[in-house]
Image (cartoon, helix red, strand yellow):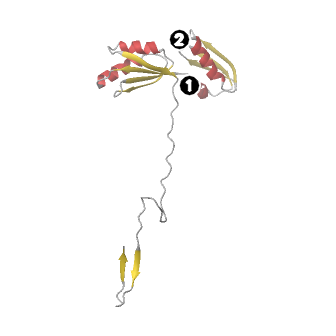
Amino acid sequence: MLQKIELDVSINNCPKCKTKLLKAVTKIEGIDKISVDSEKGKLTVIGEVDPVLVVTQVRKTGKKIEVKVSIHCHKCKSDVLKSVTKLQGIDQVSVDSEKGILTVIGNVDPVLVANQVRKTGKVAELTGVGPPKAKETPPPKPPTPVCIRDCCCNKCQLVAVSYAVPYDNNPFCSIL
């Protein structure tokens, strides 16, 4: 069944952003027509396609912006977060207080992010702009081997158990 899906996107009249958005969405199968209105900030997709898949592809076009900010207390952190979240096109915002790094993921101009931080009275320095990295799962650790037999590893200890019958018929057990 043909569906018409309209999404609000913020590409700020940027031709590269528009091209990147179109390339991402055209990878989806079942699309008959795609149009982007930069002025209105609308993406229209017509076809037999899952809307969730379209939204997922659009979100992948966002960029990761890292800004160095001096954050000394909880109030500083909340002031910076409040000011940055007012911008449109942001998917995720996080602050690492120890490192003093504000990370913004989404379709937003890095200069606007820095200016918004500066409005709080903080010094903002752009340290990185690029595509967001996919979450990497660490490789599973190999299981630690369990030594069953006498071997040359340092984790195993040889224990000798013997049963002896002395000449006076008093049996006893000896562990060496």
**Residue 41 as seen in the image, left or right of residue 118:** right
Q: Residue furthest bottom?
A: 168
x, y percent for residue 128:
46, 20
Disc 2: CA contacts within 10 A as few (<14), some (14-19) or many (>=20): some
Question: Label 2 is placed on what type of residue?
Answer: Asn
x, y percent for residue 168:
34, 91
What label sits on residue 12 in the rendered view? Answer: 2
Disc 1: CA contacts within 10 A as few (<14), some (14-19) or many (>=20): some
Q: Residue at x 61, y 15 (%)?
A: 19
**Residue 136 as seen in the image, left or right of residue 80:** right
Q: Residue furthest front?
A: 152
Screen quadrant of the N terminus? top right
Disc 1 to disc 2: CB gap under 8 Å: no
Question: Label 1 is placed on what type of residue?
Answer: Lys
Q: Nearer the viewer, residue 56 or 115?
A: 115
x, y percent for residue 61:
56, 22
What label sits on residue 60 in the rendered view? Answer: 1
**Residue 24 as seen in the image, left or right of residue 103:** right
Q: Which quarter of the picture shows residue 49?
A: top right
Q: Residue at x 60, y 19 (%)?
A: 21
Screen quadrant of the C terminus? bottom left
Q: Which quarter of the picture shows residue 41?
A: top right
Q: Secondary structure at mark 2?
A: loop
What label sits on residue 91 in the rendered view? Answer: none
x, y percent for residue 20:
60, 18
Give the Cα distance between marks 1 and 2: 17 Å
